[in-house]
Amino acid sequence: MEISESTMTKSIMPLLISGESSLCPILATVKCESKRVGGRTSEYAYVTVTNYDRIILYRFNEYSSYVEYYTLDTVMYSDFNDSGKGQYIIEFSFLTEKGTKDLYLTFSDEVRGGGFPHQRPNAIYLFELLKSKMI
């Protein structure tokens, strides 16, 4: 699978519902629990926040992909860290039908090798937008 901004846009667009807009799509990594590996691992994800206050994650690795949706009104806990050097970490706990779901996002305002010309403004906007909605 090619990892690029155009692929990200093509992956996110069909996930939007009628009238919904992707506000700040970025490439991020998401920590995940893995029983096979015996600890925490990370996956790539295309992440965006929408005008309907939804967080959409298109998670993928070299073998598969899947989608997760979260609404901001179900956030029970959030923590935001900005390294000051273009690295961002956001941690959430969401209330779901099956209990609490933790989400740990890490992203940078620059992607090595290019391919994401809007990563910097979108990363900054995503971080600030989510932080402002949690206060």
Image (cartoon, grey):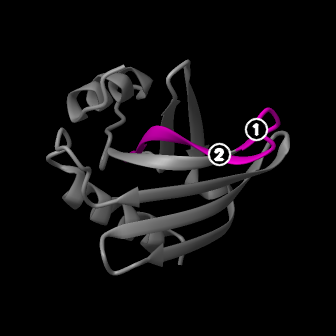
Contact? badges 2 and 1 (CB < 8 Å): yes
Q: Residues within 10 Å of mark 1 (few under 14, many from 20)?
A: few
Query: Residue 3 location, x and y as percent?
Result: 31, 30
Locate residue 85: give its quadrant. Answer: bottom left
Q: Depth check: 50 or 66 in front?
A: 66
Q: How many marks?
A: 2
Side of 25 where 55 appears, left or right: right
Q: Residue at x 43, y 73 (%)?
A: 132
The residue beneath circle 2 is 41
In magenta, the rendered stretch is: 33-51
Q: CA distance from mark 2 to mark 1?
A: 8 Å
Report whether 101 appears left or right of 51.
Answer: right
**Amino acid on which the number 2 mark rests in the picture:** Thr
| 3 is within the stretch colored magenta | no
Please tell me which residue lies in front, 133 or 113.
Answer: 113
The amino acid beneath tag 1 is: Val
The quadrant of the image that shows the N terminus is top left
Task: Residue at 31% x, 38% y: name it.
Answer: 21
| Relative height, residue 122 to residue 25 (above, below) | below
**Residue at which label 1 appears:** 37
Name the residue rendered at 26%, 55% in the picture. 122
Say above or below: 59 vs 124.
above
Q: Quadrant of residue 46?
A: top left
Image point 38% across, 20% down: which residue? Answer: 14
Instruction: Please tell me whether the stretch drawn in magenta is mainly helix, strand or loop.
Output: strand
Picture coordinates of residue 19, whole percent (x, y): 34, 32
Q: Which mark is residue 91?
A: none
Q: Nearer the viewer, residue 111 or 48?
A: 111
